[in-house]
Amino acid sequence: MILETISVCPICSGESFNSVLVTRDYTVSQKEFTLQECENCKFLLTNPRPNQASIAQFYQSDKYISHTGGSRSLIDQVYLQARKITLHSKFKLIKKYKKVGTLLDYGCGTGQFLHHMQSRHWVVDGVEPSDNARNMAHQLTNQELYNQLSAISKKFDVITLWHVLEHVHNLNEKVLELKSHLNQDGIIFIAVPNYESADSKKYGTHWAGYDVPRHLWHFSKTSMIKLLSKHGLQLLNIEPMKLDSYYVSLLSEGYKYPKSIGLIKMMSAVISGITSNKSAALSGQYSSLIYILKQA
């Protein structure tokens, strides 16, 4: 593993960072990683982190379900059931802004969202760097998919990133590249974890939303809006992903209490999810948030 250190904040160009948290890769390697905060704008990032050549090894696990589609464990089953619900919720949300058209799902995983949108008469394309996940998505959608955005020359009415932006190494470059693939009247939907949520504060270093080192960046509302407005994207709305608080809490329970009985973890996660969403109903700080944007 080769680590690289970020010396300049991608949002404000600040050059001073403070270490605020040490957490662990609970999914693959069990290695510890440090979260640092920009002194100037308070943006949170994993620093140092594996470079692009080294990061692939941290996705190579049957536990990383978005790339494998596995369904053996209790957590996998919860994820798959939640995904069935959220697929239709995503479709309904997009329909508020665009009835039908062309759609690019960046980081399409095993292709379930693309397939769902296909069945609703959308013309879809997907980008997925994982060969295994991309092959599964190809089989599901019966069309060519891409391993990088630069292989696509056309523009789209809608671009979606469902928990993907936190994974990309070159943050500013990627936002600009995505914007260049958006039609002038197009809409982009970006979902990311929110470390200011109540479930994040409850679980601390065991919060599954940190997911180091795969999550390179950790967003608050403030940092996300600064980043996107910096690149000429206008915020239309912020929508919650309410089911995420339950799934993230279930993962976090497992990280914090690995020897706990499955049913106890499930009950604790449900209580945590309810509590987090109730808190967010007042504060707006849900476990995950969808930022809806257009060209400024």
Image: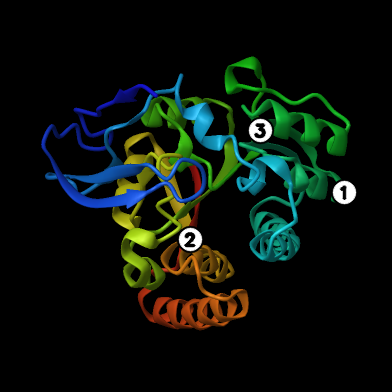
Place of residue 48 in the rendered image (x, y in percent of width and height, measured from the top left): 27, 33
Residue depicted at 45% across the width and 23% down the height: 54
Cα distance between the residues tagged 3 and 1: 18 Å
Pointers 3 and 1 in contact (C-beta within 8 Å):
no
Q: Quadrant of the C terminus?
A: top left
Residue at image point 65% right, 60% down: 93
Lateral position of residue 8 relative to residue 4, left or right: left
Disc 1 marks a residue whose amino acid type is Ser
Q: Quadrant of residue 122?
A: top right
- Quadrant containing the N terminus in the rendered view: top left
Which of discs 3 and 2 lies nearer the camera? The answer is 2
Is disc 1 in contact with disc 2, using a CB cutoff of under 8 Å?
no
Look at label 2 and name its amino acid. Ser
Q: Secondary structure at mark 2?
A: strand
Tell whether 133 sits left or right of 272: right
Q: How is the image coloured?
A: rainbow
> What distance separates the C-alpha of mark 1 from that of mark 2?
26 Å
Q: Residue at x 39, y 26 (%)?
A: 170
N-terminal of the pair, mark 1 or mark 2, is: 1
| Mark 2 neighbour class, 10 Å CA radius: few under 14, some 14 to 19, many 20 or more | many
Identify the residue position indicated by label 3 in the image.
156
Give the x, y percent position of residue 289. Answer: 48, 59
Q: Which residue is mark 2?
A: 288
Q: Secondary structure at mark 3?
A: strand
Residue carrying label 1: 119
Residue sitting at x 49%, y 47%: 293
Label 3 vs label 1, nearer the camera:
1
Where's residue 84, x and y in %? Answer: 76, 61
Q: CA distance from mark 3 to mark 2?
A: 25 Å
Tell me if mark 3 has few (under 14), some (14-19) or many (20+) residues whose alpha carbon lies within 10 angstroms of its own: many
User: Which is more toward the observer, 217 or 115?
Assistant: 217
